[in-house]
Image (cartoon, coloured by chain):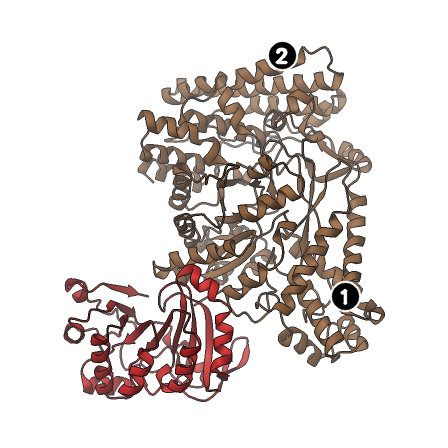
Amino acid sequence: MNRGIIFSIEEFGVNDGPGIRTVIFLKGCPLRCAWCHNPEGISFKPQYMEKKTGRMLCGYTVDAADIAEKILRNRDIFEMCGGGITLSGGEPLAQHRFVEEFLQQTASLHRAIETSGYAPPKTFRTIVDLVDLVLMDVKLMDSAKHKQYTGVDNHRILKNLDYLCTSGKNFVVRIPLIPGVNDDASNMQAVLSALKGAKSLQRVELMRYNKLAGAKYPMIGREYHPPFDPAQTPYVTDIFEKHQIPSIVLQ
Amino acid sequence: MNQRIKELRAFIMDKKHHMHRHSSEHLGIHQLNEIYRRENLSPIERAVRNLATVFDREQPVILPGERIVLTRTVADIPDLFTEQEWAEIKSKYYLHERGYVCNISPDYATTLEKGLEARKAEITARIADPANDAEAVAFLQALLQSVEAIQSLVEKYEQYALSKGEEEIAATLHAVKTDGATTFHEALQLLRILHFTLWASGNYHNTLGRFDQYMYPYYRKDIESGRLTEETASELLEEFFLVCNKDSDLYPGMQQGDNGQSMVLGGRSITGAYLFNDLSELCLKASYELNLIDPKINIRVDKDTPLEVFELGSELTKIGLGFPQYSNDDVVIPGLIAKGYSREDAHDYVVAACWEFIIPKVAMDIPNIDAVSLAECVRNRTKDLKHCATFDDFMRLTEDEIRTQMDAIHRKHRNLWMAPAPVMSLLMDGTVERGRDISAGAKYNNYGIHGTGIATAVDSLAAIKKYFFEEQEITYEALTDALANNFAGYAEIKEKLRNEAPKMGQDNDYVDAIAVDLLNRFDAVLQEYVNERGGIYRAGTGTAMYYVWHAKGLGATPDGRIADEVIPANYSPSLFIRQKGPLSVIKSFTKPNLRRVINGGPLTLEFDRSMFKNSENIGKLAHLVQIYIALGGHQLQLNTVSREKLLDAKVHPENHRNLIVRVWGWSGYFVELDECYQDHVINRIEFGL
């Protein structure tokens, strides 16, 4: 009976976990990342977007059981290709009751969650225990810089990352490569240290800064002023490979 | 691609070989038809004389680095008949397209194996049969003369090669002038000669068939004996593929690129073996390396085809060639058997110029003879809604309208006539035995009918069912008046029909059940007709260029589409609907019993190029194709496009000469298309990320 607000369902998600995945984008996020490319996912309320094709209402509420039932219709397809569902956002953990019910209802599917890790540890653990794979963003290890660029302190995030490293749960660490912000060697070294010994870490995904990130801001009546030079090419570390942690650069 | 192939590719792409071309007028052979008329030559005598004359005027050319030769220098093939004669023919007969045999799949294998001398001997023996009638004797003599014309062209090239010190070329030509091929190289050269001759005979949409099957024995033998390595074989293969792009701008078609050089790889044999072999794989790799629009690759797959095959295919999709196109043996073969093809023939099916399923060697099918506008069928009967008590009554009226269109089509096709095609006959089974030209028919003489606007028709029917019959929200007067006035003054109704009504492609059983019903009825109506050659009519889901023709002049439809607005190409969702994504499209479009619409016509999915930035996504696309096949789809074609690039190419064609797009059943260069086709490609739906 839990309701949640989502802003998009993508049927052929190919960048958020194994196989062909249906990705549900939950609306609302406590972070304010300076490079966010889904600004319409930040507010927890429905809002209008002005698209080339006309005005469109972005965000609608759904019932967890209803949406689970719809997704389950494609179970045969997911089984054929080793795919499943991924909850993304926004920050899905910000709607943890909805997420919890949805995950319980879809237990027969491969379930992944893409999260910033910014949630109370209890919430984080409850949800992590329900999924098959966690795609966790690790942006900045330095607490002050984290607050500067994302609007929140990273204390909880690191605590949750610690849990993940020892939980035995399969997980992927995703690092956005933001030129001049977090692509420096010392940040990468710090991430590496945090991941040391994590047996269930599948790999590290280095996500190149999305140069189209600014595209959607005007559609929701906002301006995009990144506090870094978007045209700069980020430094792509090889530190993880050097330490036998598989890594891949995603565009 | 090694250096030699790279240079040859650049030479051909820069059209440097065009300097060797001369028009028939320049060569003084543009009015042969007047001579034929004066001499009162029969059509078949003209066909042979024409070929011999063209070959006589052909000037041997060896492009720098070539090992497989034959380049067209006679730019246009003279017509067999004068304008007045054509007018007379048309007054008496029905002509399909240009009146020449086209769009069938020749048997190259027999001649490759036996050689031209053996074929001559076979014909000579057959001429001696005292039971022959005059027509048979004339036909068989024409065959003989055609082979002789081919041999003299080969001889001319051989002498030229010798004079240029090209000994390998000369030796290859010398061998295949008389004998069957003994090596892969000879087989490719002889295939080039035969294919070249078909085009020079005025036949068109000359498909290449199951190349990886009939060429495999030569390939394997050379690999096993050590004559070739995979690398040297690839080089020859790449050259052959390149050769297919050499004269293709001279081949007749609706648009540049629509030349029907289809090649079919893989497939399940009658004994259950999957026939995708080393050569099939090399073909995909050669196509990937060359990145050219010909030959157009099709892969026969089924639910048990290994994922690797789909992955190899997806690599080609990624570079934006618009092929491979996939066809599903699990659907096509039983579908063809149900339509009366023998089990053996059905297992040998290939794809015609675009997507039509045809049988090599034995079928003189005309799989693109006409089209029924299903969208129009629904629209035309909307005025009779007031006489319908139930939705099913209205479905019956729609079916009646299909019948009305079919009656007209059936009447139109009486007295079919085609110009005799001795060379094509030489390459088809049973013609020598029968002593009859292939244009007179073969073992199968079936006609194919495209069904256009399937999604438009289905969406219209769904809207009628929901808003007129069930919810009764839209009255008869409002609906008919709105359609008649192109929704002027009916904005609310238009919005409801266009944006709120359920649509085919959204995995909605309510709509999809109507699609199942409509396609079953389409097939059932066609089964009531027998063509004058004793063949059947096959229903199909392709559209060819009819998607443009049938949209123009088609008034507003009950799916909220306005008058003259485009309808989808082939078997695809309507262009303006709100898409949920490719899984929903696939699920919707695999619900109909596609065995019944076995004339073919692919579901088309378009992906944004950005999807392939991550190499892992090739595998995911491969899975998507596999899913379509597993769910019972018959045919699938995928495009990789970037909308921005296409828009820019319209404005700056000079910067996008090599931009390839899939048009309806073939890939062509975007900048060479007429604007209406360009715009349609741009408007199609993309599953961008």
Q: Mark 2 is on which residue type?
A: Ala
- Where is residue B75 shown, x and y percent of the image? 56, 33
* Residue A219 appears anywhere in the view: yes
**Inter-mark Cα distance, 2 to 1:** 62 Å
Q: Which chain is brown?
A: B
**Quarter of the figure with residue A191:** bottom left
Label 2 belongs to which residue? B125
Looking at the image, can residue B61 be seen?
no
Label 2, residues with CA under 10 Å away: few <14, some 14-19, many ≥20? few
Q: Amino acid at mark 1?
A: Asp
Name the quarter where the N terminus of chain B is drawn.
top left
**Dot 2: chain letter:** B
Quadrant location, the C terminus of chain B: bottom left
- Residue A107 point in image, percent of width and height: 41, 73
Q: Are marks 2 and 1 on the same chain?
A: yes
Q: Nearer the viewer, residue A249 or A88?
A: A88
Labels 2 & 1 near each other (Cβ < 8 A) = no
The residue beneath circle 1 is B392
Chain bearing tag 1 is B
| Place of residue B402 in the rendered image (x, y in percent of width and height, measured from the top left) | 76, 55
Q: Which of marks 1 and 2 precedes in the sequence?
A: 2
Q: Secondary structure at mark 2?
A: helix
Chain A palette colour: red
Q: Which residue is found at the position 68% from the left and 31% from the top?
A: B442
B359 and B658: which is toward the camera: B359
Residue A31: percent from left, percent from top: 32, 86
